[in-house]
Image: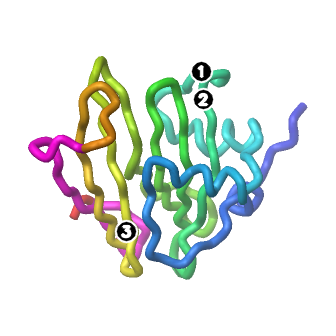
């Protein structure tokens, strides 16, 4: 029988980083080189319960990115999830005991039919999150300016992630 892991085992995979941080299409490469991968046991115990469905394990990869440094009343972690034609940066906040407070996808790339949807997020020192979103056709790297928009979120002092 597999050993049950504890929350500190999970958060140890996410080195603390001072803000601001920008998460773009290729940022995950830096984290995958610098951070140890998450074990299947950690993924199954701490990430899968947050998902609305359990993805195909063979086609899904998770990369621990970072923990937001200097939060006092909560723990905030960011990881990258890669599935076939869908790549997402997840932000989750937890109580100091490890109970989930909030979980949101804050950036990523998604391909649907012939359209590529991209979003880039910047988290600043006040835990405000600016998300630039847009789409392009046929994998074009340029956003269609008519599809571009900016959304805002923030992490409140209690750890809740809310739309701004």
Kindly report the distance in space between the C-alpha atoms of the residues bearing marks 3 and 1: 30 Å
Q: Is residue 141 left or right of residue 35?
A: left
Contact between marks 2 and 1 (CB within 8 A): the answer is yes
Q: Is residue 74 left or right of residue 57?
A: left
Kindly report the distance in space between the C-alpha atoms of the residues bearing marks 2 and 3: 27 Å
Disc 2 secondary structure class: loop
Task: Tell me which residue sits at (52%, 71%) in the image.
Answer: 74
Task: Tell me which residue sits at (54%, 78%) in the image.
Answer: 18
Q: Nearer the viewer, residue 153 or 133?
A: 133
Q: Which residue is mark 3?
A: 155
Disc 1 secondary structure class: loop
**Residue 29 falls inside the magenta stretch:** no
What segment carries the magenta color?
Answer: 143-162
Q: Residue furthest top?
A: 113
Give the percent coordinates (x, y) of residue 85.
Answer: 45, 26
Q: Is 39 situated above or below 163?
A: above
- Between label 3 and label 1, give the one nearer the viewer: 1
Q: Nearer the viewer, residue 43 or 16?
A: 16
Kindly report the distance in space between the C-alpha atoms of the residues bearing marks 2 and 1: 6 Å
Q: Which residue is mark 1?
A: 56
**Residue 151 falls inside the magenta stretch:** yes
Q: Where does the C terminus fall, quadrant-wise?
A: bottom left
Q: Nearer the viewer, residue 90 or 52?
A: 90
Label whose residue precedes the other's in the sequence (2 or 3): 2
Task: Tell me which residue sits at (20%, 57%) in the image.
Answer: 150
- Numbered marks: total: 3
- Between label 2 and label 3, give the one nearer the viewer: 2
**Label ID, residue 97:** none
Label whose residue precedes the other's in the sequence (3 or 1): 1
Q: Which residue is mark 2?
A: 60
Q: Nearer the viewer, residue 92 or 29?
A: 29
Disc 3 secondary structure class: strand
């Amino acid at each position: 029988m597999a050993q049950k892991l504890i929350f500190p085992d999970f958060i140890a995979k996410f080195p603390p980083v001072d803000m601001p941080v920008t998460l773009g299409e290729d940022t995950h490469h830096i984290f995958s080189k610098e951070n140890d991968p998450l074990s299947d046991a950690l993924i199954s115990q701490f990430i899968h319960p947050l998902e609305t469905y359990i993805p195909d394990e063979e086609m899904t990869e998770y990369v621990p990115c970072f923990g937001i440094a200097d939060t006092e009343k909560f723990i905030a972690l960011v990881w990258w999830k890669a599935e076939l034609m869908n790549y997402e940066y997840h932000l989750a906040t937890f109580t100091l005991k490890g109970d989930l407070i909030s979980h949101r996808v804050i950036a990523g790339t998604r391909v649907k039919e012939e359209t590529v949807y991209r979003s880039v997020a910047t988290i600043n020192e006040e835990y405000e999150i600016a998300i630039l979103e847009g789409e392009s056709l046929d994998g074009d790297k340029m956003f269609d300016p008519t599809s571009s928009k900016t959304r805002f979120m923030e992490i409140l002092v209690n750890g809740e992630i809310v739309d701004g």
